[in-house]
Image (tube, coloured by chain):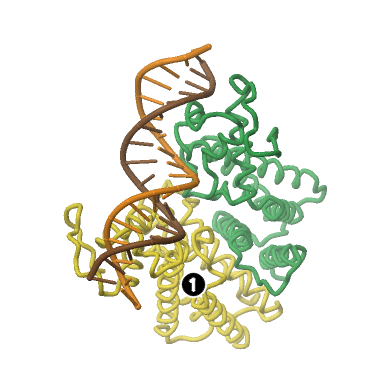
Chain colours: A yellow, B green, C brown, D orange
Amino acid sequence: MVLSRSGSPPAPQPYHHGNLRQALVDAALALAQQKGPERVSVREAARLLGVSPAAPFRHFPNRRALMTAVAEEAGTRLRIEVQKAVAAERRDGVYRLHAIGRGYLQWVQAHPAHFRIVSARDQIDAEQSVSLQAGTAELQQLIRQTLQQAQSRGDIRSDLDTERLLLLLRASLYGLARMQIDGHLPQWQFREEAEAATLQGGLDMVLKLLKPPA
Amino acid sequence: MVLSRSGSPPAPQPYHHGNLRQALVDAALALAQQKGPERVSVREAARLLGVSPAAPFRHFPNRRALMTAVAEEAGTRLRIEVQKAVAAERRDGVYRLHAIGRGYLQWVQAHPAHFRIVSARDQIDAEQSVSLQAGTAELQQLIRQTLQQAQSRGDIRSDLDTERLLLLLRASLYGLARMQIDGHLPQWQFREEAEAATLQGGLDMVLKLLKPPA
DNA sequence: ACCTGAACACCGTTCAAGT
DNA sequence: ACCTGAACACCGTTCAAGT
C-alpha cells in the first residue's frame, strides 16, 4: 500500500519498527502485478522498503513463505468476492450457481496476478497453509450446497451424482480461468470484453447442460 | 538421453562437437522431472554435460528459449499420444471423443513434468513457437471435427453451438488436468489409480451431459 | 563454427554484530 | 525484538579469446 514510487533509494525510513511483515506482503504483491509472480525477488521487495536484504528473513523463513502469505491474502479476497456475488443474487437455484461462477471468473479477470499467485503451486506452499486450505474448502462447500439446493428445486438434473457434478463444475471453472490466464483463449479478439464474453459463454454452456431435459 | 548418472565432474567429453543443442534439451527435461521445471538451471544442465556455463548460449539466446524447446518436444509427444489414442478407437462418434479425453488425461498423469512445461506460460514463449502453436491448433481441430461428427451422428446434442461446446470440452479437460497437476484433487485417496478414476469420472460426466435428452 | 574463462549484476540465505 | 553488514554459493548473460 505505502510504496514510494519515486527515485531509486527510498531513504531509510523508520521501518525499524512499523509493520515490516505486512509491508513485505504488499510490496511482493505489487511486484507480482508489475512483472509476474515468478519474478518477485525478496531483495527487491526489501530494497523498495528501504531495509537490508536480510531483514525479510526475520519475518519469513524463506521466499516461498513470503509468497504463500501473498497467496493467502489473495485467496481471502477471492473467497470474499465470490461470497459477495452469491449474497447479491436474490433469486434462488441455478441463479445462485451462476452468480458463483460469474463472481469467480470476473475476479480472476480483474486480478490476474492475484489468481496466478493463489494457483502457483511452484511458488507457494498451499498444503501447509491453513488459510488457503480453509478458503478452498469453504468455496467448495458453497458450490456443493448451492448445487444440491438447485438439484432439489428441480433446476438442475438430479439423476446425476452431486459429487461428480461438483467436480465437473470446479474443473470447468478452473479450466476457463486458467485458459484465460495461460493465454489459451482465442486471441483474434483484442478486447477484454470479448474474453469476458468467452468465459461467460463457457459458464453458460455448463449450466445449460445441467438443466433437466425438457 | 545420454546423461552420465555417476559422480560430480562428468569428465570433459568430446562434446566439442556432438549435438549439444539436443543434449541440452534432454538434460533440461531430465532436471525438470527431478526437481520441477521452475528449478531447471542452464548452468546445471551445462555442468551435467561437461561444458562451460556459456556454451548453452551458442544454441539458445536465453533460458526461456531452452525451456521452450523442451516444451516443443513435450507438446509433440502429447499430440502424437492423443492422435494414437483416437486411431486405436475403432468405434465412431462419442467413443472417439472419449478416446481423445482419455488419451490426454492419461498422458498428463503419466508425464506430469512434461505437461507442466507445455503449460508453463511463465517459463516458455508459447506464442513465439510455431511448433507449439501448430500443435495446439491441430489438437483443437481434432476435437472439433470429432465433436461435429458425433453431433451429426446424433451421439451428441446438436441443438447447441459447436464452438461453445468445444470451448467447454477444452476447459473441462484442461481444468481436470491442471487440478491434478496443481494438487487440487481430493487427497484422501492415496493411490494414483484413484486420481485416474477421478479424472475419468470428470470426463465421463461431461460426455454424459452432452448426450441428447432421451 | 563452436566452445572456454573470466567477468558482471543479480539472487536466496546465513550469521555475527549492532540498536 | 528487530535490523544491518558482510559473506557464501548460486544464478543468467556477455564478451573477448581460444581451437
Sort mark 1 into few (<14), some (14-19) or many (20+) by Cα contacts within 10 Å.
many
| x and y, in percent, of residue B192 in the image | 75, 63
- Residue positioned 44% across, 72% down in the render: A72
- In this view of the protein, which residue sits in the foreground, A71 or A172? A71
Give the image quarter of residue A209: bottom right
Q: What is the secondary structure assignment of the residue under circle 1? A: helix
| x and y, in percent, of residue D6 in the image | 32, 51
- In this view of the protein, which residue sits in the foreground, B197 or A209? B197
| x and y, in percent, of residue B210 in the image | 66, 64
Instruction: Tell me the quarter of the image containing the C terminus of chain B.
Output: bottom right
Q: Is residue B199 found left or right of B90 in the rendered image?
A: left
Q: Is residue B169 found left or right of B124 in the rendered image?
A: right
Kindly tell me whether residue B73 is visible in this rendering.
yes
- Residue positioned 62% across, 38% down in the render: B27
Above/below status of A74 relative to B27: below
| x and y, in percent, of residue B110 in the image | 72, 52
The residue that label 1 is drawn on is: A101
> Furthest-right residue in view?
B90
Chain containing mark 1: A
Q: Amino acid at mark 1?
A: Gly
Kindly tell me whether residue A116 is visible in this rendering.
no
Q: Is residue B155 found left or right of C19 in the rendered image?
A: right
Instruction: Tell me the quarter of the image containing the N terminus of chain B.
Output: top right
Give the image quarter of residue A12: bottom left
- In this view of the protein, which residue sits in the foreground, B104 or C16? C16
